Every structure is written in C-alpha cells, then in structure tokens.
Amino acid sequence: MTFDFQTWMRAVWTSIMEPSDSARKVIDMNIPRDALWMGLALVAVVNVILVVLLQMISPAPVAFQEQGFALSPFGFVAIIGVFLALFVFGVFYAGKIMGGQGSLQGTLAIIVWFQSISLTLEAIQVALVLISPAIGSIFGLLSLGALIWCFVNFINVLHGFKNLGKAMVAIVLALIGTALISGIVLAVLGVGPTGGMA
C-alpha cells in the first residue's frame, strides 16, 4: 500500500467526516504501545515547530510578550509533551469514571491520531496565513469546530458510550484534571511562562 500526501489528506478528511468509523479503525490497528508513545512525542515536537512558524508569520502583540509569556522551544515542548501525556491518562480515567470501556492503549492511539489530524489542519492554516491572514483565521475557526466534533465522536467510540453528551462530559473532566496536574508537574520541573526551564 503506497502512502503519499493525497492518501494522508483523504484519511484526514475521512476522520473528520466519518469520525466514528475512523476511531474504530485506529483502535483496531492495535499499534504497539511503545510506538504510540513515540508518536505522541513526535506530535508534541511538530506542534512546537508549527507554533514557532505561526509566531514568525503572525507575531504576538507586544503587550502579550511583555507579560512574560515568551517561551523557548524547549519550554513549549515540555509544556505540550507533559500536557499530552497526562491528557492520555485523563481521558482514560475520566471515561472509566463515566462507565466507559476504553483501554489505555486505545486511548493513546486515539490521542495520537487526533493530534495528527489537528497538526495537519494547523499546517494548512499556516500556509493560508501566508496567503491571507483573514482566510487563515476563518479556516482556523472552521477547523476548531471540526476538531471538536471529531474528538467527541472519537471518545464516544473509545469508551463505548451511547451518546455524545457523555463523551463531552468525560472530555471536560479530562481537561480539568489534566490542566490541574500538568500545572503542578510543570511547576516542579521549573517550566514556566517566562522562557522555558527555570
């Protein structure tokens, strides 16, 4: 089976238009857990690259920079990496609390696949911003809506819920828990909004 740009974009499009079927296929692939953790690390790095590119072509306002929010690439990687790793466990346990049946490996596969889709749309947005910031912004809003729809369906399939409302509650719980714990972990590691490692 050949794998090229067109095949990838078709897979991304299918995941957005038919998220439930795509989630089942991703989980059924049974990708080894070590490979999935490596994939998660990779998407964290790519995420940072895209954020840096977006800042270069659409820099943050001076007022925002003056508040001490500038981060080194290493700081970005640390924050995104820690958040994603904890989010995997957050989604897994939040689903369990809600009566879900998803496995940790399935959760990891879903998060990695979702991040891959998200990064693809983000890369397209970066390209569109170069053409027209306005078009890039509109695409960003549309992408956000599509990603939310996609992820809710992914979690619904992962945990075997019967309705999307339950999946949304699980996601909110996971986000809250992940934000709280990652804040503590990053503080312990000395990573803050003032430029990376303290």
Image: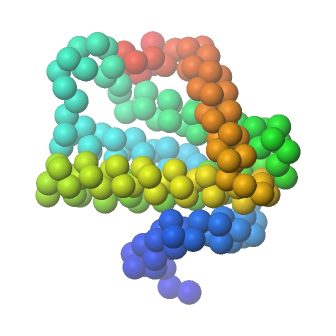
Residue 60 visible in the picture: yes
Image location of residue 7, percent across then percent down: 46, 79
- Quadrant where the N terminus is found in the figure: bottom right
Residue 105 visible in the picture: no
Q: Residue at x 63, y 58 (%)?
A: 153
Q: Residue furthest left?
A: 131
61 is higher (above) or lower (below) than 90: above
Q: Residue at x 64, y 44 (%)?
A: 168
Image location of residue 116, percent across then percent down: 50, 57
Image location of residue 132, percent across then percent down: 14, 54
Q: Residue at x 63, y 36 (%)?
A: 172
Q: Residue at x 26, y 45 (%)?
A: 53
Front in this rendered view, residue 161 or 114: 161
On screen, residue 111 versus residue 158, left or right, reads left
Image location of residue 19, percent across then percent down: 59, 65
On screen, residue 45 versus residue 110, left or right, reads left
Please tell me how many numbered marks the rendered image carries. 0
